Amino acid sequence: MPSTTDKLPLLYIPDNAEEPIREVELRSGPHFGIDMREYLGCPIEEAETIYSEDLLTRFRGQENGIPVDKPFDVYHAYLDEKADATRPANARADTLLYRHGVHGPVLVSRTTCVNTASGKTAPVEFHRVTEQGLKALDFKNAVESFNKEKEMCK
């Protein structure tokens, strides 16, 4: 179910395999970064794009990406920037995000965005992310395609 409230839904994937993966909500606005760093237990977080329909379109040669005002989805993973050196490997995040070498806890978001006439990307809706959704074949195929196109652009 979409959210446009002051709470942002995220999926929390702990690095401790005994701790359950769970849906959480963090405050939006200026509190978001503070709450996220507290949740992740780190002073500096890093946001990585796991999948973006807009970036995928750009990787495939459409310079302007998704047309203005047409909605598209973006998945982000928020991680401890220094986790590789200081935190244990997170095999569950590796599996769910179709990546290798994830360390520390991870928060995952899904946002519907639009490109604006001024060239910016604006969030429209925030959606729940579930473990089952990340395990879905459609999501797996989308992320693998995104990663392949991203590598070809390097």
Image (cartoon, helix red, strand yellow):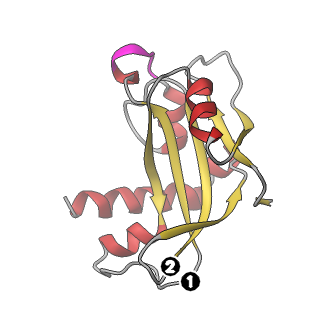
Q: Position of residue 83 (x, y in %)?
A: 40, 22
Magenta stretch prevailing secondary structure: loop
Q: Where on the picture, by quarter, is residue 40?
A: top right
Residue at x 35%, y 23% (from the top left corner): 84
First to last magenta residue range: 85-89
* Residue occupied by mark 2: 116
Q: Position of residue 147 (x, y in %)?
A: 36, 56
Q: Position of residue 27 (x, y in %)?
A: 71, 41
**85 vs 57: above or below:** above
Q: Where on the picture, by quarter, is residue 99?
A: top left
Residue at x 40%, y 62% (from the top left corner): 145
**15 vs 9: above or below:** above
Q: Nearer the viewer, residue 28 or 151?
A: 28
Q: Position of residue 35 (x, y in %)?
A: 64, 32
* Residue occupied by mark 1: 69
- Which amino acid, by three-letter code, is at mark 2? Thr
- Judged from the image, the secondary structure of the residue bearing numbered disc 1 is loop
Marks 1 and 2: CB-CB under 8 Å? yes
Q: Nearer the viewer, mark 1 or mark 2?
A: 2
Q: Quadrant of the N terminus?
A: bottom right
Residue at x 55%, y 68% (from the top left corner): 122
- Judged from the image, the secondary structure of the residue bearing numbered disc 2 is loop
